[in-house]
Image (cartoon, rainbow, N blue to C red):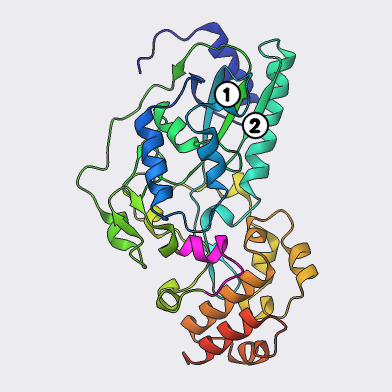
Amino acid sequence: MSNPAVPSLVELVQKLSAEVGLELRAILPATELDKEVINRFDSWLDSGFAGEMNYLKRAREVGADLRQWKAWTQSVALFALPYRRPPGGFRNGGRVASYALGTDYHNVIGRKLKKLGKRLQKAGICQASRATVDAAPVLEREWAIRGEVGWRGKNTLLIHPNHGPMVMLGELLLDCDVPAWTQPKTRNATCGSCTSCIDVCPTSAFNTEYQLDARKCISYFTIEVSDKEIPLEFRSKMRDWVFGCDECSTICPFGDEKADFDADWGRHPALQQLSLEDLLTTYEQDFHKLFTGSPIRRAGWEGMLRNACVVLGNLKKGEKALKNALDHQSDLVKEHADWALAQF
């Protein structure tokens, strides 16, 4: 998409975005996505690769046309916030995916988008807006690719030319017609012949380039299916990942390895306070209180204790805590504690 002289309306949206801590990446008309995009998504869902992530079917129902969800939508403003930072996790071991080390990105980005929407209304640019961050029925990666925010990586993630795959996406649906605009490119690149993300995956979750079988992904079974047993063949391959996984992101050659956006997202105090052994002694109500404002609550109390058992088994640590967990009220936790002790 070409970048003609920026219309004044776009400049105003850029200015207001910057005032709330966002960088506008693109604005697009809310026209239907290409049929090829929807067919690819349908095929992926029909193949069962989404596992039990049934919420993705909501996006399928909306499909190519956002106006099926919000009929008044005329334009979509696109944003991408980098989150690369030094690795981290629980005290004394148990890694957590970088995006989840601090405040929940839904809240961080969502608040900024809502604030922007109000400012756009106050400026008379639009009358209605809707902030979306991951949880809405919007194929946000496809919109970001259409808006040339980045390209589809072989690990299926959006690859930003400067920040690599470690960006969180957000959108603001608008009821006004804003001229289409895309951010000028600082470099033109693609994945080329690189397959580092495919090769590094501990569980071989990629069937082929650009196709992920989520059912084999560490992020999937440590977060999305928190009420079920982790398949035996994947437990040792989890290594020390207790929530999510960054392997296919951190190995990507795009993005500055020295970049540190820790200050933008913060570090959740519970991670600095608790070890995995401590986590195994928490009660459910205490868990939710400790992790208020953290994405880790997504996995649930029982799911996180299950994950902790597996990681302690892989690290061969916390034998006393694991033995105590054999008497846990949750059969799921007890089974994984038993497996973990067998690894010593």
Residue 206: which quarter of the image? Answer: bottom left
Query: What amino acid is at disc 1?
Result: Arg
Q: Which mark is residue 131?
A: 2
Residue 336: which quarter of the image? Answer: bottom right
Percent across and percent down for residue 54 are 55, 52
The residue sitting at 60% across, 69% down in the picture is 90
The residue sitting at 49% across, 36% down in the picture is 139
Within the magenta stretch, is there residue 293? no
Within the magenta stretch, is there residue 228? yes
Query: What amino acid is at disc 2?
Result: Ala
Q: Is residue 18 above or below residue 331?
A: above
Magenta stretch bounds:
218-229
Identify residue for label 1: 67
For disc 1, the neighbor class at 10 Å (few under 14, some 14 to 19, many from 20) is some
For disc 2, the neighbor class at 10 Å (few under 14, some 14 to 19, many from 20) is many
Residue 164 shows in this picture: no
